Amino acid sequence: MGKKIFSTILALCMLLLLLPTASFSVEEVSEHTHDQLTFVKLSGGVNDLLSSGNYYLTEDISINNTITIPNGNVVNLCLNGYSINMTGIGRVFNVNGTLNLYDCSPNQTGNISGGNGVDYGGGVNVSESGIFNIYGGSIKNNSAQSGGGVYTKGTFTMNGGSISENTAKANSGATTWGNNGGGVYIAARGTFNMSNGSISGNLANWGGGSYIQGSGTFILSNGNISNNTAIWVGGGAYIEGMFTMNAGSINNNIAKDFGGGGVGIHPIGNFIMSGGDISNNIGEQYAGAVYVEGPFTMTGNASISNNSVNSVNGNGGGLYLVNNGTLQINGSPVINNNMVDSTTSNVHLCFGRAITVIGELSLPINADSPQIGVTIKKNRTNTESTITTGYSTY
């Protein structure tokens, strides 16, 4: 009898050893070292909370459940050219602590992908307590109703890598404010700092590349927002919060059915551009570069050029100021070579809109004349409009 019980217990133990687990498998190595960190191997069964540590991949990993970084945990993850792919329904990462993402592979082929079926943050959701720093790799091919690639209420810093080919379930027949921020959605009180890398090839109804809500903040110090598509407004970015552009570029984006191929500014949004360029963007009907319904300030050597509107009956190849939109300028900004169909159209002022000069203007480098062209749309009584207010000298 005793031998039979022992045999049964032994068989059960062996069976339990064969059952799959939802924990991480790690293997310590000393060879994988960079950024002054030594990483341990992370492999199969990645369906659990991720403890503080330094991990790297040696193979593609498929997951069925979201990976969570708990509040207080600090995780350094090197993709090493491999991917973490969601094969079930859900986002890939919930970040309540700190996640630093690297990819040391020569061609930066590692990615976080496959997130789907969630209201926000298909690839990554950064909570109010969360911090996400990306140095390499890609957040790619994810989808959600808002923030197809990234949704952040916390702090997201982009030092490299890419956010690409994500979708906020855009629908050309939709007329609602849903499906915003194909690449990135910065929620109220969230912060997105971009000093390198790219946001490209993303799709949404509003804000193909990025959508900045209410008190959310986007600071662009370098890097590129390109080749994104909005069905309605803001191919590169739609600003309901605060967007500061110190350098970098917003180019080759499209507003497919309406306007603001590069940027759209909501009446309560605020866009300050002190450097960088907005170029080669397309708006279907209005504003190849920037659709302005709120405050827009251009200073320093900021440049808006070579943007276009497709429709022959459209307006504002560069800027389109409408409703409560304002444009303030100083320094040596450039707005030129923007077109509507085949006709030059740089700044289009709807009736009552004007450019306000807030400081002394100076000629752009290598220019011998002012570099801002203006088109005025008069009211039905053909009343003259004011083009500029304030003081200016060239």
Image: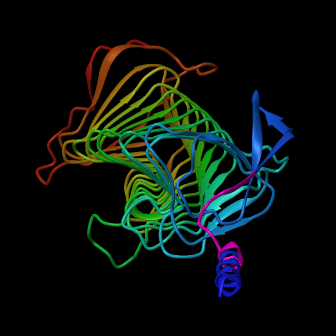
Residue 45 seen in this snapshot: yes
Residue 37's spot in the image, x, y percent?
Answer: 74, 31
Residue 76's spot in the image, x, y percent?
Answer: 64, 40
158 lies above or below 13: above
Q: Nearer the viewer, residue 60 or 204?
A: 60
Q: Nearer the viewer, residue 268 or 278?
A: 268
Q: Nearer the viewer, residue 47 or 143?
A: 47
Q: How many marks?
A: 0
165 lies above or below 249: below
- Provide the residue span drawn in magenta: 14-26
279 lies above or below 358: below
Instruction: Say which quadrant the C terminus sits in.
Output: top left
In the image, is 283 to the left or to the right of 35?
left
Residue 390 falls in which quadrant of the image?
top left
In the image, is 275 to the left or to the right of 62?
left
Residue 30's spot in the image, x, y percent?
Answer: 86, 38
Q: How is the image coloured?
A: rainbow
Residue 341 seen in this snapshot: no
Instruction: Say which quadrant the N terminus sits in.
Output: bottom right
Judge whether residue 24 is colored magenta.
yes
Check the image and name the residue furthest to the right: 31
Residue 275's spot in the image, x, y percent?
Answer: 52, 27
| Residue pictured at 44% horizontal, 43% vertical | 346
In the image, is 99 to the left or to the right of 60?
left
| Residue pictured at 37% horizontal, 24% vertical | 329
Judge whether residue 380 is colored magenta.
no
| Residue pictured at 26% horizontal, 44% vertical | 214
Residue 294 falls in which quadrant of the image?
top left
Check the image and name the residue furthest to the left: 381
